[in-house]
């Protein structure tokens, strides 16, 4: 009887993982490195096998103390990625994957101090090939769309004649 009890006890100890830190401490550790969305924090804490109550409590505490904010995360990511040459369409997609709500994404994109037309023009000029033919136009169109720009941000650049002397 004692052996069976000890065996069962050892089995439960081996299957239950105890965390070295509380969920709040681990959350603070994560937030000290960079900003995270609420969804990302939940996933990280679930990977460490914290209980759902602990996760909810830790995230609530972080939001009430303004350690974590989806608004701040959203605006920071928009600013950072737009400096890398990423357009608004792709930013929307990335933010949705990170669990940010649509209304917040739209609000932050409208409040962003980025001139999307100017950014598209800079990216376009940096990548534009020397030979400007139909194949090059198609390639540039695909590139600009893959970067997340809408057609109206760069379509006027496609119609220019880059084979004249003023662009060389």
Image (cartoon, helix red, strand yellow):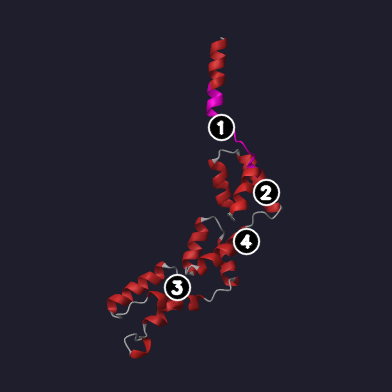
Left-right relation of 121 to 22: left
Q: Residues within 10 Å of mark 1 (few under 14, many from 20)?
A: few
Q: Which residue is mark 4?
A: 72
Residue 86 is situated, as x and y percent measured from the top left of the image, at 47, 68
Q: Say which mark, if any, is on residue 150.
A: 3
Alpha-carbon span between mark 2 and mark 1: 24 Å
Residue 68 is situated, as x and y percent measured from the top left of the image, at 64, 54
Alpha-carbon span between mark 1 and mark 4: 33 Å
Q: Say which mark, if any, is on residue 34.
A: none
Give the residues drawn in magenta, as a range: 11-24
Q: Which residue is mark 1?
A: 17
Q: Is residue 17 magenta?
A: yes
Q: Which residue is mark 2?
A: 60
Mark 2 against mark 4, which lies toward the viewer? 4
Q: Is the C-beta separation of discs 2 and 3 under 8 Å?
A: no
Q: Residue at 37%, 70% (x, y): give it.
A: 143
Mark 4 against mark 3, which lies toward the viewer? 4
Alpha-carbon span between mark 2 and mark 4: 16 Å
Quarter assignment of residue 153: bottom left
């Amino acid at each position: 009887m004692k052996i069976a009890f000890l065996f069962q006890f050892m089995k439960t100890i081996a299957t239950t993982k105890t965390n070295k830190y509380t969920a709040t401490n681990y959350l603070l550790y994560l937030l000290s490195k960079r900003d995270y969305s609420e969804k990302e924090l939940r996933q990280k804490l679930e990977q460490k096998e914290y209980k759902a109550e602990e996760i909810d409590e830790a995230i609530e505490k972080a939001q009430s103390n303004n350690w974590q904010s989806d608004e701040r995360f959203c605006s920071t990511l928009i600013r950072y990625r737009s400096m890398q040459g990423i357009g608004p369409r792709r930013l929307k997609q990335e933010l949705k994957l990170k669990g940010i709500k649509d209304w917040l994404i739209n609000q932050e994109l409208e409040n962003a101090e980025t001139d999307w037309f100017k950014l598209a023009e800079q990216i376009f000029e940096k990548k534009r090939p020397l030979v400007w033919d139909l194949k090059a136009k198609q390639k540039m169109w695909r590139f600009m769309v893959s970067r997340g720009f809408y057609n109206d941000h760069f379509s006027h650049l496609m119609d220019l004649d880059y084979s004249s002397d003023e662009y060389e």
